[in-house]
Image: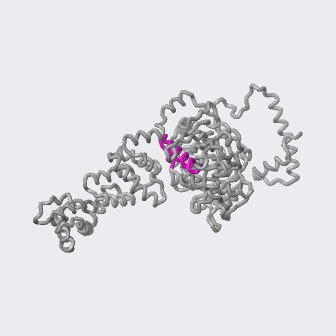
Amino acid sequence: MTVTDTTEAVLAYDDVVAAYDPVLGLEVHVELNTATKMFCGCPTGFGAEPNTQVCPVCLGLPGALPVLNARGLESAIRIGLALNCEIASWCRFARKNYFYPDMPKNFQTSQYDEPIAFNGFLDVELDDGSTFRVEIERAHMEEDTGKSTHVGGATGRIHGADYSLVDYNRAGIPLIEIVTKPVEGAGERAPEIARAYVAALRDLLRALGVSDVRMEQGSLRCDANLSLRAKVPGAAPGSAEQRAVPLGTRSETKNVNSLRSVERAVRYEMTRHAARLAAGLKIVQETRHWHEDTGITTSGREKSDAEDYRYFPEPDLVPMSPDPAWVDELRGTLPEPPPQRRRRLQAEWGFADLEMRDLVNAGAVELVEATVAAGAAPAAARKWWSGELARRANADGVELAAMPVTPAQIAALQGLVDAGTLTDSLARQVLEGVLAGEGEPAEVVESRGLQVVSDDGALGAAVDRAIAENPDVADKVRSGKVAAVGALVGAVMKQMRGQADAAKVKALLTERLAPADSTTDVSTS
Amino acid sequence: MSAISREEVSHLAMLARIDLQPDELDRLAAQLDVILDAVATVTQVAGEDVPATSHPMPLTNVTRPDEPRPCLTQEEALSGAPAAEAGRFRVPRILEED
């Protein structure tokens, strides 16, 4: 095994795409949101104490027998149908044998040459509104592995570790692995297409309701295969001449766990492959590890040949033969495809293309939809999710949907703004409280004492004080320089600690400072 | 011609993490060859109309409802482990990553 932790040479991206044609292969593992594991009744909740969601089956104890989770099978078929796949009329599970303690059985129950779903496609919308079709090779059922913690060694990584600790709570959680056919014709847009594909798949899986699709929690994981081949001069990326060039050797970058990382990892691998090829070096067929912090990949292990896994039909699980009538019934449960749904919602909400695209890219469509359903106006819902919340999610490095606030809470918060209880700036402070776990918006308003002071007495006193403390400014306003009133508004807001309606403060100030001999309608100045 | 080579036996031994000495490889390759030959006779008997059998019982679609069942406690789960630490199974260091 070769381990390279040094940075490898890379070629400038423009030079890469001028000389080479990239071919992608994307493998996405999605954890299903079933209540129980794939082959036993252990619960699947995230974050439980280690080894408390385990039983003889998922611990691989002698004599334990697996039984397939009906909802796991149903979800697999629905995913296959949503990806326009054919559904196997008969198929089996297989044992994938390997020695690694993340599976206590010494094999992973998977599917090999008989996937439940095969030969499909997914149309992926790109940033410019165009569509790219990604062909799907297969979607098959398998089980997740346990979680290893490596102890000792300088880096806390696996190499140099003294020993490892394993938690099998995750072992046996249903996984669907979705594998594309070689994605050809992407050309210089390969990194963007890789990201857009994973995003489209995530949206589809979310719409199907089969998974939490939380990349940051690992319920959606992407392995990106990439190879380069010589570019045929003058030929378009997807042309027959270009496709006729044999595929190059691929690398497989494992566990790329955010949409942005998918794009970056593919781009990095393109530049790394190209530098090797340009220098006359060979590409090693191997697993690569993506490093989020440095934006590079390093060598993992050389890829085992499939036959080294010694796949064979799983004798403890009987074959599956889904009734065609049931499959048709499941076809009837498919949701509206996300791109179509987005167009429909955009029309309903009256958003501009750019506004809608921002929402889509931020993963906020469902959130806005739920916020609107909870009573907020679409424009207000959009403003929260693609503004303040997107900014905070970005700053915290989490996905928007993972922010600890619900659409119902945002709708309630907006309701308080609409009712005049909160100004926009107070509402942002209330949001901060909600995000900090201080309760519902109304509770935070109460506990932090944040509502707009509508007590005219207190406000009037603050206005009088601001005038008294800033006589020069007050005179300017009196003499007709109405723009100067802004400084006084600021002084009043400061006294009120922001808990006043700025428009009302301005009206009070201009009313008090109106030139005595003028009949100008100051309320509009 | 033998059904299995010495190199194949050596490769399988590596995959199964069994450390075989050269003399054992020679002996086992010969023995496995005999075993594979014997099994091969079955394929001669089976006609083309007899599909390969992985499951002797004619059962399909055996599933269970997606309902949680009681688990082992952490203590029970770890009771058979040679070593445990922090509620987890402690295993020798792993040289290869997956």
Residue positioned 37% across, 60% down in the render: A432
Occupied quadrant, residue A277: bottom right
| Residue B42 counted in the magenta span | no
* Residue A400 visible here: yes
Residue closer to the observer: A376 or A479 = A479
For residue A473, side relative to residue A315 (left or right): left
A252 to the left or right of A471: right
Q: Is A163 rendered above or below residue B56?
A: below
Q: In the shown orientation, is residue A97 left or right of residue A502? A: right
How far across and down, in percent of the image, does residue A314 sit? Answer: 67, 39
Query: In the rendered picture of this protein, how many numbered marks are placed on residues?
Result: 0
Residue A475 versus residue A211: which sits nearer the camera? A475
Displayed quadrant of residue A149: bottom right
In this view of the protein, which residue sits in the foreground, A150 or B39?
Answer: A150
The residue located at (67%, 31%) in the rendering is B57
Q: Most prominent secondary structure in the magenta stretch?
A: helix
Indicate whether A306 appears above or below A333. below
Quarter holding the C terminus of chain A is bottom left
Q: Bounds of the magenta span?
A: A190-213
Report x, y in % for residue B61: 59, 33
Viewer can see residue A70: no
Image coordinates of residue A17 in percent, x first then y, are 63, 52
The answer to whether A316 is drawn above or below residue A24 in the figure is above
Indicate whether residue A203 is drawn in magenta. yes
Query: Which x, y percent locates residue A333?
Result: 48, 34
